[in-house]
Image (cartoon, grey):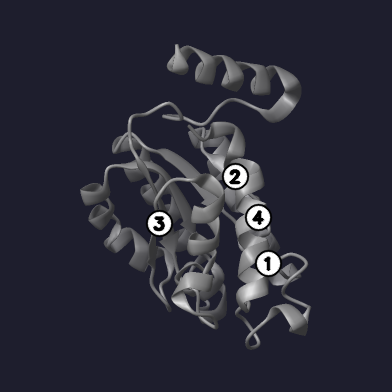
Amino acid sequence: MKKFLFLSAAFCLCAAGYGRAPLNAANAGDVIIAFGDSLTAGNGARADEAYPAALESMVKMPVINMGVSGDTARMGANRMREMAQYRPYMVLIEFGGNDAIRGRPFRETQTAIAEIIDYVQKLGAAAVVVDTGGNFKMSPYTKMMKTLAKQKRALFVEGIMDGIFHKPQLKSDAIHPNAAGYRLIAEKIYKEIKPYLK
């Protein structure tokens, strides 16, 4: 009965114009993995103030922080198999900022993110592509990630740093949010994934 209601809700969201439900959105996993770089790791705040910790209080499911400061998308793809041990229900994929800062080839970033999405879906989990946004330099990445998400039936969360990047009161340094900023990121992500939670 629960499964029926969940699938029915997903169908209604599609009919309401939200787009197709993400692939594997009704799987049996029991944790959410936040997989990304320093924005996921929570640089600039305590571990219990990082966005995955804030999100955990909203979703009422364990949220495992697999953020590694300094990671590019390719570096993330190289360690993505570490996720398998957690039996994830959903994986939040957040990369791109370091790729842009370091001038990594755009195609390299695109290919790596696609590989991560494919692997997450192969695990049976719902893939959520989390776009950094924040400033105009990230616009090409936003467009690319949105396209990938659509092609692969992954959920897309746009511009988590929009409204934060240019506000010093929400940041701990030139790049990273503070606790208040991470709380806003968690709220943005929660709003998008809420219809697909158990």
Q: Amino acid at mark 3?
A: Ala
Residue nearer the viewer, 21 or 151:
21
- Where residue 31 appears, x then y in whole percent? 36, 45
- Residue that appears at 33% across and 36% down: 29
Res 195 → quadrant:
top right
**Distance of label 1 from label 2 (alpha carbons):** 14 Å
Which of the two discs, 1 and 3, sits closer to the camera? 1
- Residue that appears at 56% across and 73% down: 100
Q: Secondary structure at mark 3?
A: helix
The residue tagged 2 is 156
Which of the two discs, 4 and 2, sits closer to the camera? 4
Position of 81 compared to 10: left or right? left
Q: Amino acid at mark 2?
A: Phe
Position of 98 compared to 81: left or right? right
Neighbour tally class for label 2: few under 14, some 14-19, many 20 plus, Cα within 10 Å? many
Q: Secondary structure at mark 4?
A: helix
**Distance of label 1 from label 3 (alpha carbons):** 21 Å
Q: Secondary structure at mark 1?
A: loop
Which of the two discs, 4 and 3, sits closer to the camera? 4
User: Above or below — where is 102 with respect to 173?
Assistant: above
Neighbour tally class for label 3: few under 14, some 14-19, many 20 plus, Cα within 10 Å? some
User: Can residue 17 be seen from the camera position used here?
Assistant: yes
Which one is earlier in the sequence, the residue at label 1 or at label 3?
3
- Residue that appears at 56% across and 40% down: 155
- Where residue 189 appears, x then y in whole percent? 61, 51
The residue tagged 4 is 187
User: Above or below — where is 34 with respect to 164?
Assistant: above
The residue tagged 3 is 112
Which one is earlier in the sequence, the residue at label 2 or at label 3?
3
**Distance of label 4 from label 2 (alpha carbons):** 14 Å
Q: Amino acid at mark 4?
A: Glu
